[in-house]
């Protein structure tokens, strides 16, 4: 496992193949659950929206990295996608980011209405727990996975508050504010994805530590790359409005450190992720490649 | 235990004494949890708002009814109050009921802002799980309680959808629609409160069945009484706007069955609750009295 392998050699279709397991699994779960028809439609619209399924892929690849089977990791993979989807639905609401489009489709409150978007978001959070408690039979494992999901969800919501309704002490430096926002808002669910996968694969304490370190490194890296893309890519390349952070005077890595030091930070985090995986050997190669893909992604 | 005991003989202060255990417990939990200061304020404002704490009281009284100790039931008691509070915060939002006042105080989105009310509501749902996973050490019990909470929460959200965004098949009768709405929207959390209490008291299967039947009866009864009060009480007596259901042309028991048959339904459900408690004997007397109080309440 070498960190000098060129990113272009990565077979992304193969790397993200677990997404193709999660989608039908989640769809079947939603179809089987008794709920009002319009609520099911709204939840399905949001949860089954086209996407990279990065978090579910990390759950499954982390499970496999410690010798587990992909099928053992499907409940938390579906659960974390539901949590991610719920957060996007609520973030898009008029009182929050007020977005009309997400990945080229109307956001849920534009597709249905605001009341349904609020309720469907709430339902998705509850359904994330439902998939865990109904699909994982071992009580201790279900408890551990659900507790992990809870930690990620509370941190993610705190991150959203730090980001949109900042309430920091005056003494906190901009870089520390930024790390707090990024680690909570994006990092928490990514860390938790890796940890839940490890747990499903019955990871040892050392293996869980490795995957936690990996998850923390790529979680922060993901958001730093996001900050960088906003200033270096065009709207056309990104598939979403570029330059939005600067326009909104947002606290970002390039704004605080400049572009070159931000690039160096990406490389440092990429290396930290590689180092964390080293003890896991060959089964962790897909996570290594995912990290490299995330480091050099252009949208 | 006689069902002919006059309701006026009930010592409500003693009956609802467990509320005085839950409030400081929940407050301490929220103070100890690491989160942004403004989010903690918002969550505390909503979760610690003056209220009857009916659901936590039912959790604790149900635990005691099967021989358990009140202290064993505090985590689910706090959790269900957080879920109830979250549902009120989201229900009050402009896109939902658009209420400015709740129990004489500004609703959370008026006290803070809409974005914070959405996020604090989300946080309260996640914190409900957090209190269970951090405060209940036995993995199986934590799993069972959290799964129960999930069932109540998904049903409650479905009930909110049935009530505000109805999507029933044309063939469903008004009474069946009404039962579906009431059983989900209000009944689910009340049933789950009784069941979680029973579980914390290590109830036998028969005892759990008794408390489930009791919870279902009083859950429906609570909402039927609510419907009745809206047409029989003045705004002054209720402490909230009376006649709102008729004005909004809402599906209610009095609208479907008339006032007299609705009163008879309350008595029938009250009796069903008494019958369900009979096998539990004297330790269930507080639940019996709570049922009677709920049947004759005037606000």
Image: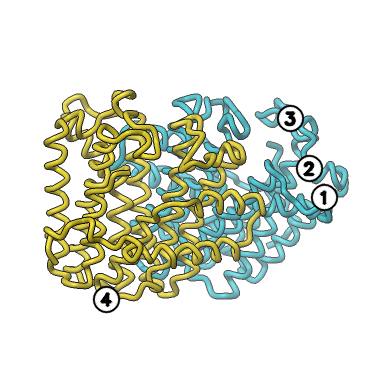
Chain colours: A yellow, B cyan
Q: Chain of mark 2?
A: B
Secondary structure of the residue carrying tag 3 is loop
Q: Residue at x 75, y 41 (%)?
A: B227
Lateral position of residue A54 relative to residue B101, left or right: left
Q: Earlier in the sequence, mark 2 or mark 3?
A: 3
Residue A293 makes an appearance in the image: yes
Q: CA distance from mark 1 to mark 4?
A: 55 Å
Q: Residue at x 78, y 43 (%)?
A: B252
Secondary structure of the residue carrying tag 1 is helix
What is the x, y in percent for residue A10?
A: 25, 61
Q: Are marks 4 and 2 on the same chain?
A: no
- Quarter of the image with the N terminus of chain A is bottom left
The residue that label 2 is drawn on is B251
Q: Residue at x 29, y 26 (%)?
A: A246
Q: Are marks 1 and 3 on the same chain?
A: yes
Say the numbered circle drawn on residue B242.
3
The residue that label 1 is drawn on is B174
Say the numbered circle drawn on residue A67.
4
Q: Chain of mark 1?
A: B
Q: Earlier in the sequence, mark 1 or mark 3?
A: 1
Secondary structure of the residue carrying tag 2 is loop
Q: Are marks 1 and 4 on the same chain?
A: no
Q: CA distance from mark 4 to mark 2?
A: 56 Å
Q: Are marks 1 and 2 on the same chain?
A: yes
Q: Is residue B278 above or below residue A96?
A: below
Q: CA distance from mark 2 to mark 3?
A: 15 Å
Which is more toward the observer, B299 or A148?
A: A148
Q: Chain of mark 3?
A: B
* Labels 2 & 3 near each other (Cβ < 8 A): no
What is the x, y in percent for residue A109?
A: 56, 38
**In this rendering, the label closer to the viewer, 1 or 3:** 1
């Amino acid at each position: 496992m070498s960190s000098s392998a060129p990113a272009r050699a990565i077979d992304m279709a193969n790397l993200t193949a677990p997404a193709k397991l999660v989608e039908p699994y989640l769809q079947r779960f939603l179809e089987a659950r008794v709920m009002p028809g319009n609520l099911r439609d709204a939840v399905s619209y949001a949860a089954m929206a086209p996407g990279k399924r990065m978090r579910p892929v990390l759950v499954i690849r982390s499970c496999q990295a410690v010798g587990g089977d992909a099928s053992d990791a499907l409940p938390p993979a579906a659960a974390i996608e539901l949590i991610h989807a719920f957060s996007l639905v609520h973030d898009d609401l008029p009182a929050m980011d007020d977005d009309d489009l997400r990945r080229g489709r109307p956001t849920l409150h534009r597709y249905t209405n605001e009341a349904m978007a609020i309720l469907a978001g709430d339902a998705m959070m509850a359904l994330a727990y439902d998939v865990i408690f109904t699909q994982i039979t071992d009580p201790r494992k279900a408890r551990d996975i659900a507790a992990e999901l809870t930690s990620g969800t509370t941190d993610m919501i705190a991150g959203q508050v730090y980001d949109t309704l900042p309430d920091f002490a005056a003494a906190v430096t901009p870089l520390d504010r930024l790390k707090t926002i990024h680690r909570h808002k994006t990092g928490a669910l990514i860390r938790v994805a890796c940890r839940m996968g490890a747990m499903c694969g019955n990871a040892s304490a050392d293996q869980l530590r490795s995957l936690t370190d990996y998850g923390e490194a790529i979680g922060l890296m993901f958001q730093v790359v996001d900050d960088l893309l906003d200033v270096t890519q065009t709207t056309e390349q990104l598939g979403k409005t570029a330059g939005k952070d600067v326009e909104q005077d947002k606290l970002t890595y390039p704004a605080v450190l400049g572009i070159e030091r931000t690039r160096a930070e990406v490389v440092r985090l990429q290396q930290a992720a590689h180092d964390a995986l080293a003890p896991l050997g060959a089964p962790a190669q897909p996570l290594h490649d995912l990290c490299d893909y995330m480091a050099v992604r252009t949208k």
